[in-house]
Amino acid sequence: MMLGARTVSGRATLPLLLALGCGGDDGRADDDGPTGATGSATQGDELGGTTSPTEGGSGGPTSGTGSSATLDPSAEGTATSDDPGPTTGDPPPPGSCGDPPVWCPTPTTSWQWQLSEALDTSVDVAMFDVDLFDNDAEQISTLHDQGRVVICYFSAGSHEDWRPDAGEFPPAAIGSPLDGWPGERWLDIRDPTVRTVLAARLDLAADKGCNGVEPDNVDGYSNDSGFPLSPADQLDFNQWLAEQAHQRGLSVGLKNDLDQVEALLPYFDWALNEECMAYDECELLAPFIDAGKAVFHVEYVDTPADGPALAAAVCPDALARSFSTLIKGWDLDAWRIACE
């Protein structure tokens, strides 16, 4: 579930060319904070084949591939919830951090988010965010061959009745419908069986070769979920998700849940936000940038024809904040405009 729209084997050992970095107090980020920038948007071809962003902006359309470092995330196998995760004993690869090492993107890292239609692998970016269930290991390997990091999307806080593991969730843990999303209901994130199913999804992500995960709907406590979820329940669940991802060598991003950013910042490697500019709440994401962690940000348009005007309105602010901002359609197909 997105804001107003559907966000519809073997561990990889291929070298990736990335624009990223890490460090910081917890070993995951180290940056002096955002750098000021102004600029406009660059629009690619009709399928969104744009180039990666130029740091700091240039006051107009830009192109290029950005700087890169070589990453060889060689880790095999998967972990159970009681297992510390796959490790090889090798030193952490460049562009990674943590133990086991995970992908730690820095502000302005380029990306593409595509959760519907046939995957367009031609977009020249550092990271692709794709659906965990709709993309097989071969598709993920193809992106790796092109030097891309692959993040795999799944819903962690809602039950989607079309997913192959939908029957594994206990009926008592399936709550109120998500408004506007037929077939989707909130989950009781306190339920141990729910967590067992989600741990299996993380195993699947590792098995397919995903470099990280984007767990969605991790703010049920602030919605009418049908369960008496507290802020403390949500913090416990979100921290558990991050820890489980890291045990499997997976990078993990915090999706929305802006009111808990300060508490969750040490656990998450990056953030993904929808429409903070539309809701005037982007300042809540500043702690990620200040910690040297990327903020992947999207503002939506109803039709591609509306994209250039919205990009002109939001890109200068996005670049000044060092966000990795895209203008996307609600269906999250390949079309995009990147703020560069």
Image (tube, rainbow, N blue to C red):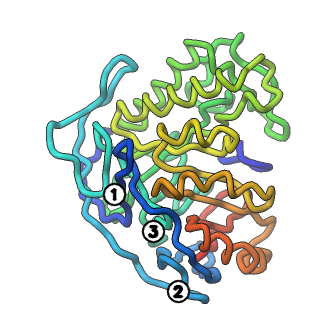
**Residue located at (69% from left, 15% from top):** 173
Q: Is residue 142 visible?
A: no
Measure the alpha-carbon separation of dots 2 and 3: 14 Å
Helix or strand or loop: what does disc 2 sit on? Answer: loop
Q: Which residue is tagged 1?
A: 144
Neighbour tally class for label 2: few under 14, some 14-19, many 20 plus, Cα within 10 Å: some
Q: Position of residue 198 (x, y in %)?
A: 52, 26
Measure the alpha-carbon separation of dots 1 and 3: 12 Å
Helix or strand or loop: what does disc 1 sit on? Answer: helix
Q: Which residue is tagged 2?
A: 62
Residue type marked 2: Thr
In this rendering, would 2 be left or right of 180? Answer: left
Q: Is residue 105 visible?
A: yes
Helix or strand or loop: what does disc 3 sit on? Answer: loop
**Residue located at (68% from left, 68% from top):** 327
Q: Position of residue 194 (x, y in %)?
A: 58, 18
Of the two numbered discs 2 and 3 in the rendering, the one whose residue sits closer to the viewer: 2
- Residue 125 circle label: 3
Q: Position of residue 41 (x, y in %)?
A: 63, 80
Foreground pick, 224 / 1: 224
In this rendering, would 178 be left or right of 241? Answer: right
Residue type marked 1: His
